[in-house]
Image (tube, rainbow, N blue to C red):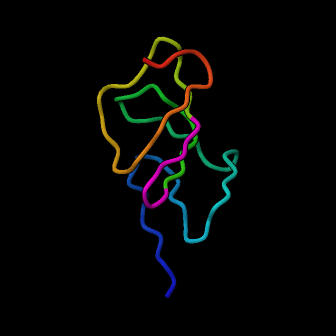
Amino acid sequence: MPRTISAARTFGAKRAGPDEYHFDFAKIPKVHGPDFTTATGFCVEGERMIVALMRMPAGTGAELHWHPNEQWMYAVEDVVR
């Protein structure tokens, strides 16, 4: 029985489809979070996890908020507090 693709639960994310494992971020529209964050980038959401490449201007951040699935962050440059 084929699985159906539900809508992304995360604002602006691209929802991964069944057996879809490779994503070209250059073909996914950039997401700019709602008013609670300065982050902009590419976001793919699966059933239980989000994978994203986001950037924030130095000295900015996000207000306290939550996501409906698991996430982890890895700072490529600078420092996260």
Asked if residue 76 lies left or right of residue 59, the reply is: right
Residue 20 sits in which quadrant?
bottom right
Please give the name of the residue rendered at 68% of the width and 50% of the height, measured from the top-left corner: 27
Q: Is residue 65 magenta?
A: no
Q: Which residues are magenta?
A: 46-53
Residue 78 sits in which quadrant?
top right
Please give the name of the residue rendered at 38% of the width and 54% of the height, measured from the top-left corner: 9
Above or below: residue 29 compared with residue 58: below
Image x and y of residue 77, in percent: 61, 19
Image x and y of residue 44, in percent: 54, 51
Asked if residue 66 lies left or right of residue 48, the reply is: left
Asked if residue 39 lies left or right of residue 35, the reply is: right
Residue 60 sits in which quadrant?
top left
Please give the name of the residue rendered at 38% of the width and 50% of the height, measured from the top-left corner: 69
Which residue is more in the foreground, 49 or 31?
49
Above or below: residue 9 compared with residue 57: below
Above or below: residue 8 compared with residue 33: below
Image x and y of residue 4, in percent: 46, 76
Q: Residue furthest bottom?
A: 1
